[in-house]
């Protein structure tokens, strides 16, 4: 079944621990007078409070992120009884709830304390100025508790908890040539131990063999594929190839420039289709493919395609796909998609070093681009990785793009190119999970200049400014090279995600 991280919904269960005075009396716990002391007055007031809180909660929980469940309500009284039935009522639908949204009134303390100890789920506390008197108990007893400052932060918390849930429920398709956690050449900075990722993040990994996948890129022979003779496999069909040929015509028509033949474009689209079919069969919402390992088999050269377009089209669909077998980048992109609904872009992220001896540029940045930049302090560049067409969001149409070829001599391997000069001045957020599952690097930047739109291969990218280039480089050395990017500033949301995932946020 096709899965997308954006289809994941966070089930939010409201829990109301109310309180009702059964008798008329005055004293140090009664802060009112007149009819406010009358038996039955609390019931009316409680109804109004719950109605208002539910209205606020439904407004704070976006429909594309949350499902707000029916509330569970228990009303304690000044007889101070504590019943098992109270907990049974509050924990109803325990299996369906992802997070509890809790409102408690003064006097219902015993009920809400016992609920917190027994719910074993995250708890978001209803915003209230008096919360610290109560919430400290949850923190002191180890309840996973989030105390929003206001209703806007309720929205932030449900968004980051949905992202955590999406990562926990994700199955990542791993196209493997060799049985190893890492590519033989490439992402040495990815996760060191996938079982540790599964234990800490909840993510599952589902490998398939590269050679079997290659055999699926043509219609099934009568005798079956050579790698799996006699078995039924998800080979591409003649009808699907015809559909891809029509899609190739559409892409070539929409492109601002196209430097690849239709035949080779269709070859890349076939790889995308077969990967998607395997993701569908294995209920995967992300994938990672080891470029160097597959390239060195020479089968990509023989079949005249690369996986670049596959990754780009999957990212557009909200199904993060990483090149270089960079599994850490794939999960980082999933987090960014959930928090921004933007198409992520992963690429080599490199400093432009300014020192006493001059400025050190990477060779791919043309001389004329370098000369246009006056202030070279705290600059970084992103270079050499397949780009996106959709720069305004996953739900928005594609902007101006070109289709280039990856292979210089034989001109195969379709790659989208985007001109980042259209985005000068736009804010961006880059991020990366560390390979030891302990940190989340979060980088805020602003695009200064684009380059390489007219280049072939996956060359090109953009130059951007950060607050402290030297510090970023030092942090990168601990966490990794490729820092997936999305447009917009989601640094606050990523910092909150680090909080709910138990990671150390490193903010630059």
Image (spheres, rainbow, N blue to C red):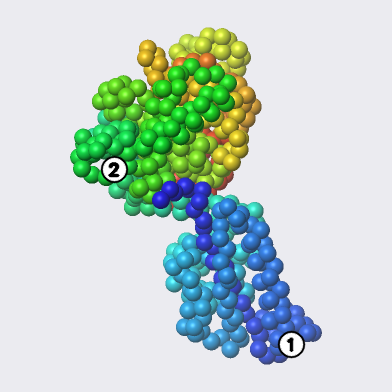
Whether residue 381 is visible to the viewer of this picture, yes or no, is no
Secondary structure of the residue carrying tag 2 is loop
What label sits on residue 233 in the rendered view? 2
Please state the horizontal and vertical placement of residue 374, each as a whole percent of the image.
61, 14
- In the orientation shown, which residue stands out farthest toward the right? 34
Please state the horizontal and vertical placement of residue 210, each as a whole percent of the image.
28, 35
What label sits on residue 358 in the rendered view? none
Query: 422 or 115: which is nearer to us?
Result: 422
Query: 168 or 128: which is nearer to us?
Result: 168
Please name the residue shown 51% across and 11% down the image. 366
Label 1 belongs to which residue?
A: 38
Please name the residue shown 56% across and 60% down the image. 67
Mark before the other along the chain sequence, 2 or 1: 1
Query: 371 or 140: which is nearer to us?
Result: 371
Neighbor class of circle 2 (other Cα within 10 Å; few <14, some 14-19, many 20+) is some
Neighbor class of circle 1 (other Cα within 10 Å; few <14, some 14-19, many 20+) is some
Q: Relative to 324, is 367 above or below?
A: above
Query: 295 or 12: which is nearer to us?
Result: 295
Disc 2 to disc 1, how far (Cα)?
74 Å
Please name the residue shown 63% across and 62% down the image. 57
Please name the residue shown 47% across and 47% down the image. 4
């Amino acid at each position: 079944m096709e899965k997308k991280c954006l289809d994941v919904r966070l089930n939010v269960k409201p829990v109301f621990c109310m309180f009702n005075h059964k008798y008329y009396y005055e004293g140090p716990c009664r802060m009112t007078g007149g009819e406010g002391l009358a038996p039955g007055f609390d019931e009316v007031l409680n109804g109004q409070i719950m109605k208002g809180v539910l209205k606020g909660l439904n407004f704070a929980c976006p429909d594309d992120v949350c499902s707000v469940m029916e509330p569970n309500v228990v009303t304690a009284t000044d007889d101070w009884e504590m019943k098992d039935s109270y907990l049974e009522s509050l924990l109803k639908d325990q299996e369906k709830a992802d997070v509890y949204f809790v409102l408690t009134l003064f006097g219902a303390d015993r009920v809400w304390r016992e609920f917190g100890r027994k719910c074993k789920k995250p708890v978001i506390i209803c915003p209230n100025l008096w919360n610290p008197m109560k919430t400290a108990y949850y923190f002191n007893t180890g309840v996973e508790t989030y105390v929003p400052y206001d209703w806007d932060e309720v929205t932030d918390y449900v968004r980051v908890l949905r992202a955590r849930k999406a990562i926990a429920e994700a199955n990542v398709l791993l196209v493997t040539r060799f049985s190893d956690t890492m590519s033989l050449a490439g992402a040495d900075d990815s996760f060191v131990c996938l079982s540790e990722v599964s234990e800490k993040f909840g993510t599952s990994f589902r490998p398939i063999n590269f050679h079997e996948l290659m055999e699926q890129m043509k219609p099934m022979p009568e005798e079956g594929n050579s790698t799996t003779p006699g078995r039924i496999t998800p080979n591409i069909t003649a009808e699907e190839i015809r559909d891809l040929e029509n899609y190739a015509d559409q892409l070539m028509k929409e492109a601002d420039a196209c430097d690849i033949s239709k035949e080779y474009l269709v070859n890349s689209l076939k790889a995308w289709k077969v990967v998607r079919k395997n993701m569908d069969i294995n209920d995967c919402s992300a994938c990672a493919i080891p470029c160097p390992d597959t390239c060195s088999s020479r089968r990509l050269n023989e079949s005249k395609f690369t996986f670049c377009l596959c990754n780009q089209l999957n990212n557009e669909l909200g199904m993060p796909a990483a090149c270089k077998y960079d599994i850490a980048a794939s999960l980082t992109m999933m987090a960014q998609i959930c928090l921004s609904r933007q198409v992520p872009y992963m690429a080599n992220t490199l400093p432009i070093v300014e020192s006493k001896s001059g400025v050190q540029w990477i060779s791919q940045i043309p001389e004329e681009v370098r000369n246009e930049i006056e202030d070279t302090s705290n600059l970084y560049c992103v270079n050499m990785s397949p780009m996106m067409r959709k720069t305004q969001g996953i739900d928005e149409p594609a902007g101006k793009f070109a289709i280039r070829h990856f292979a210089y001599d034989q001109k195969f391997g379709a790659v989208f190119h985007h001109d980042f000069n259209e985005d000068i001045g736009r804010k961006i957020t880059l991020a990366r999970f560390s390979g030891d599952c302990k940190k989340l690097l979060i980088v805020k930047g602003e695009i200064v200049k684009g380059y390489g739109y007219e280049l072939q291969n996956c060359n090109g990218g953009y130059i951007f400014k950060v607050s402290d280039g030297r510090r970023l480089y030092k942090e990168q050395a601990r966490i990794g090279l490729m820092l997936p990017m999305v447009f917009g500033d989601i640094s606050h949301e990523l910092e909150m995600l680090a909080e709910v995932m138990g990671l150390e946020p490193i903010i630059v």
